Image (tube, rainbow, N blue to C red):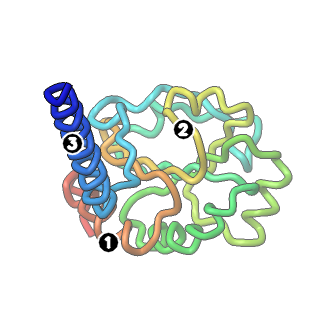
């Protein structure tokens, strides 16, 4: 009887130490700067093919093939998105550098709302594509806005950020990604 009690105490002790170890690991991992980074299966692979209407020219379609030859930053936004409003000044500053083409990807928005939003906050985009029903967004793995992708001149996805791009993201992540693909300052 005493032996079975000792065995039960040992098992409970081992389980307790295991749980403490998992808790400690979780605390250590939660302190990482990239803890919210979501890996994209598209990194290092060709950007999804698309043919989408242009916000300011609804009858015009632009395909992914037409964007080849120069890198571009694809910024997913919507007039309904509070985070898009937060990052908009940063996206505007990136566009003003003219280091890389910044393409707006207006996602699941109403046409008039998108135009009104750009009139109110300014249009930093070289081009604004529209995905009204969100079908093309599935191919990109987009599940929220804002999200931002860096696509190189050959059409390969090189970087992705989920959430608002802020100054820290710009300096610590996007600029090094631009440097890595050889985009001059």
Q: In the drawing, does residue 149 fall left or right of residue 25? A: right
Please, is residue 25 above or below residue 124 in the view? above
Q: Quadrant of the N terminus?
A: top left
Q: Are marks 1 and 3 in contact (CB under 8 Å)?
A: no
Q: Are marks 2 and 1 in contact (CB under 8 Å)?
A: no
Q: Which residue is mark 2?
A: 142
Q: Secondary structure at mark 1?
A: helix
Residue 28 image position (x, y, % from top left): 25, 59
Rendered residue at 63%/43% (across/down): 129
- For marks 1 and 3, give the CA distance: 47 Å
Q: Which residue is mark 3?
A: 13
Q: In the drawing, does residue 52 fall left or right of residue 149? A: right
Mark closer to the observer (2, 3): 3
Please, is residue 40 above or below residue 121 in the view? above
What is the residue that sits farthest to the front in this orientation? Answer: 1
Rendered residue at 35%/41% (across/down): 39
Q: Which residue is mark 1?
A: 171
Q: Secondary structure at mark 3?
A: helix
Mark closer to the observer (1, 3): 3
């Amino acid at each position: 009887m005493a032996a079975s009690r000792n065995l039960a105490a040992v098992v409970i002790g081992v389980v307790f130490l295991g749980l403490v170890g998992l808790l400690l690991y979780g605390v250590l991992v939660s302190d990482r700067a990239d803890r919210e980074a979501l890996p994209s299966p598209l990194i290092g692979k060709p950007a999804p093919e698309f043919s989408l209407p242009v916000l300011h020219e609804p009858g015009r379609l632009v395909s992914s093939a037409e964007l080849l030859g120069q890198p571009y930053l694809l910024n997913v936004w919507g007039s309904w998105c509070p985070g898009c409003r937060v990052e908009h000044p940063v996206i505007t500053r990136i566009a003003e550098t003219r280091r890389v083409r910044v393409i707006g990807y207006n996602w699941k928005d109403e046409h008039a709302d998108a135009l009104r939003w750009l009139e109110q906050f300014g249009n930093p985009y070289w081009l604004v594509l529209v995905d009204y029903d969100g079908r093309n967004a599935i191919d990109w793995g987009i599940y929220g806005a804002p999200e931002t992708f860096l696509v190189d001149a050959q059409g390969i996805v090189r970087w992705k950020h989920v959430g608002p791009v802020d100054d820290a993201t710009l300096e610590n992540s996007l600029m090094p990604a631009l440097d890595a693909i050889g985009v001059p300052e």
